[in-house]
Image: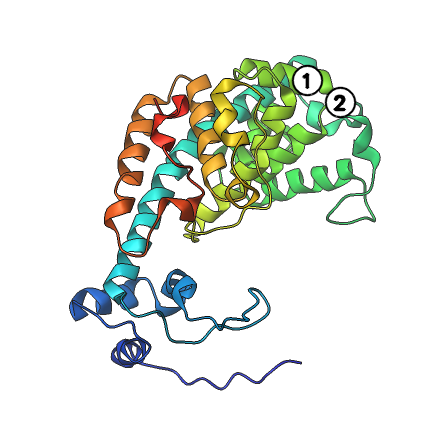
Amino acid sequence: MSTEFTKEFKTYDEQLRILAGRNLPSRNEGVCLRALKQIGYYRLSAYWYPFRIRDDDHVEGIDTPHEEVFPGLYLDDIVLIYEFDRKLRHILARALDRIELATRVAVAYQLGQHDRFAFEREDMFNDNCGSPSHWDPRVSQFEAFRRMVTSRQIESKEVFVQHYAQRYGGRLPVWVCIETWDFGTLNTCYQLLRPEDRLAIAASLGFVSARTLGSWLDPFRVLRNLCAHHSRLNRRHFASIPRFARNDRYSHIHSLNEHQKHRLYPILVAVLEFLRFLEAKDGFTKELRSLIEEIPSMPGLAERDFGFPHNWIEESVWK
């Protein structure tokens, strides 16, 4: 049963006092006040939520924890955790840009060899494309994809879209149209393609298995959206997780427990490996590793929050 929202508006100074009364005081009020003004109470609250006191019989996801946090932390520490998360998002956003663009080109190149308008032809897609869409069971997966493509094209403000609309009636060849797609549309297209085309695309990007690439794109889509919307990565549960080959290079991934497998770490490894295939890994690995190595010095933050295994830095994927 719903409850009427009755909380009153609070000034920034009042917010500081409320948090101090909940065991989250400020060391430097100027820093904390600026964080409340520039980041916001509600967004920061996601970072102190894990530290709120739970009763012994607390059931996560059902029971509400107490407003008070465990003693020992400061609001300044929460701000530092947020700043770490922000830096991590920025690094990953740049990496995912490289991955998204390379995948776009590979998909457009493969489809363009068949027909410059291949994405409009249902026969260019696999047998499942005629089944009901997950988003709208009234239409097929192919029709849902075509609607996504049309929507992206209509929403686009790019000059080249206007040019093609005026000169060619708005019909865009695949290598042009794909530039209007977001990661979700790109992922949907790849998943619906014929097996032989998926394999050719995967091989052109350095993958041995089309299934592996397919399992990486959806987690990348989710991560890309989180980065774009400034959303929390710390202690984030990911429902969609990447698959890895059964070999020595990825043995430590397969040794992770179920909790770790649904944290950020496996997706980080997938990002690293994709960049390795693109021969664009070195600078990114160094920057990411340097940031992760800051974690032990930060109160309230731990490598396990992101699913990192013990001695992760010794694994070959981080070399």
Q: Which residue is mark 1?
A: 197
Element under label 2? helix
At 68% across and 17% down in the image, what residue appears? 197
Element under label 1? helix
Q: Which mark is residue 124?
A: 2
At 27% across and 65% down in the image, what residue appears? 73
Task: Determine the image quadrant of residue 293.
Answer: top left
**Amino acid of disc 1:** Asp
Q: Nearer the viewer, residue 235 or 206?
A: 235
Q: Which residue appears farthest toward the front when viewing the image?
A: 56
Left/right placement of residue 304 relative to residue 24 reads right
Q: Is residue 134 above or below residue 146?
A: below
Question: Which quadrant, please, contains the N terminus?
Answer: bottom right
Locate residue 62, reporting x and y percent.
60, 69
Discs 2/1, front: 1
Are circles 2 and 1 on residues that touch, CB within 8 Å? Answer: yes
